[in-house]
Image (cartoon, rainbow, N blue to C red):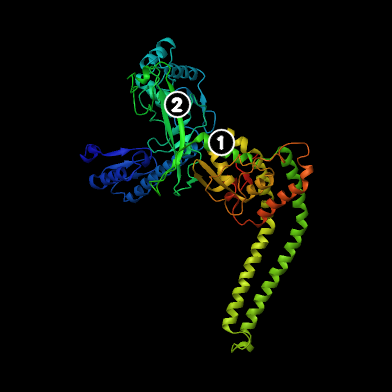
Amino acid sequence: MQRLYRGEIAGIICWKLDRLARNPVDGGSIIWAIKQHGIKVVTPAQSYAREDDNIILMYIEFGMAQKYVDDLSKNVKRGLKTKTENGWYPGIAPLGYLNDTNKQTGLNTLLKDPERFPLIRRMWDLMLSGLYTPPKILEIANTEWRLRTRPMRKLGGKPLCRSAIYKIFTKPFYYGSFEYPKGSGKWYEGRHEPMVTPAEYDRVQTLLGRNGNPRPRSHCEFAFTGLLRCGECGSTVTAEEKHQVICGGCRFKFAYRRYEACPRCHLPIAEMPNPLFLRYTYYHCTKKQDPKCSQKVIPLADLEGQIDQYISRIQISVRFKKWAFIYLSELHEKEAKSRNDDLQARQKAYRDCLKRMDGLVKLKTSPGNADGTLLSDEEYGRQRVDLLKEKAEIEELLRDTGERAEQWWKLTEQTFEFALTARSRFAKGDAKTKKEILATIGSNLILKDKKLCIEAKKPFFLIEESLSGLKSPDHRVEPEFILTPQGQKPTDASSCLSLRGGRDDVRTLEHRNKKLVKSIYTFYKGYRGTPSSIFPGWSHDEHSISGRRG
């Protein structure tokens, strides 16, 4: 551009104008050079010069080039966002993994590198042993194992450098998590096969003196935050982790995130023989409402034990679930005729309502009512409001008769499916699954004196009430001084075996069991809330808890 401005060049030959500029600054510079310095731009299709009087076309072409770049940027960002949300790391796979290029562009996944994955894992093992430093591991990998970076078109195929070894040992990707964009604080759980566990990653960070800082911390690690409230001051209940280590030399226990060496014997953590790392999770009141709240912390294991104890009180057997589904189908079919009769009656009532509204309008506008003797304005307004209200109520009932009738059935089925599988899913599930299960079972979850009070939602309260045949004061879940939620009996009932075992668990209690199924079905018939308010994971497309059915 400087040579153009100095007049050293007469013009530019290019294939298309977008080869010269794709932003307003560069495009403006080219146009300014044409107008002020008289240069000429020549393409195979057209030439542009001051005397040709076609500069306006350059504005259009440069604008189209800018639009193309903007659209391309949006499309690429959208594609990368979709890829990360699906759990796949964008860009070139880290060492030890390969990009699967056999799929369509944008759908590439990550595979284990059969040549380098085992070697990188061995490097982690050496670091976890605490007997090797990163430079020593680097030397072993490069000289003894002959590890080389992945060959690419112009790069790769070379030994690891010093910075690469530290990138490997500090990259959360290797335990299954990654941040995108970098520095944004948005972390995703990858779908690739992790190379190490989170505990192993934390151990390596401690040995590196990083105290685990690269590991992302988010509320999703804690299952029950956001659900519980303090029974004393009403504040929310939060959770925190405690990380401690028992010194391999003097056996002194201390919080290793604040120290690089044992406070007693001053032995560095990285040089300790067989240190024992401990990790605890506690739940406690945030004390935002009352800083003087006296509630103490409760370990995660105790809290989960209380939740599991409550879930056991609504657990049903496979045999009962199968029987309930059969009886529910029969009940649904029997009510189909009555629903048809109700539908016809409601349709007739709707037609009558419309006729009365028409008659009211005719009476109001009739010549005999010119002076308002037959129907005054006040009376007309009152009757019209009543008829509009009646019309809206009938329309709501007509909507309920069709689509909602199927929903009653599905919700009742899902309730028994949940009661069957909730306990095993809670025991084996991750934090997200446990949170979903607790949110499904109850609301108004109060924690006081290390005891959890669960106000069960109506369907599960009905199951618990039906199962609580035997009483036992030894299995309390609620705090001693918290009132029982309205409409519920004291929750000191033990787990009743009447629906869980025995060959006659259904036949001998048929009347009671039918009453239970009818009660839950009737509850959903009159329920006006959304299905997701009962089942937080409810999918409107599949009419079931997404990914959890069965």
Q: Residue at x 39, y 35 (%)?
A: 182
Tag 1, which secondary structure?
A: helix
* Residue 90 in view in this figure: no
Mark 1, other Cα within 10 Å: few <14 / some 14–19 / many ≥20: few
Q: Which mark is residue 494?
A: none
Q: Which mark is residue 305?
A: 1
> Where in the figure is residue 442, as x and y percent of width and height?
57, 47
* Residue 453 in view in this figure: yes
In the rendered image, the vertical position of residue 78 relative to residue 374, given as above or below: above
Q: Residue at x 64, y 79 (%)?
A: 360
Q: Nearer the viewer, residue 457 or 191?
A: 457
> Where in the figure is residue 383, as x and y percent of width and height?
61, 77
Mark 2, other Cα within 10 Å: few <14 / some 14–19 / many ≥20: some
Horizontal side of 303 relative to 167 (left or right) equals right
In the rendered image, the vertical position of residue 349 relative to residue 381, given as above or below: above
- Screen quadrant of the N terminus: top left
- Whichever of callouts 1 and 2 sits on the residue coming sooner in the sequence is 2
> Where in the figure is residue 481, as x and y percent of width and height?
52, 48
Horizontal side of 543 relative to 514 (left or right) equals left
> Where in the figure is residue 415, as x and y percent of width and height?
65, 45
* Three-letter code, disc 2: Leu
Residue reaching furthest to the front: 473
- Screen quadrant of the C terminus: top right
Q: Which mark is residue 278?
A: 2
Query: Looking at the image, is mark 1 or mark 2 nearer the viewer?
Result: 1
In the rendered image, the vertical position of residue 382 relative to residue 228, given as above or below: below
Q: Quadrant of residue 394?
A: bottom right
Tag 2, which secondary structure?
A: strand
Q: Residue at x 45, y 38 (%)?
A: 297
* Three-letter code, disc 1: Gly
Horizontal side of 251 relative to 503 (left or right) equals left
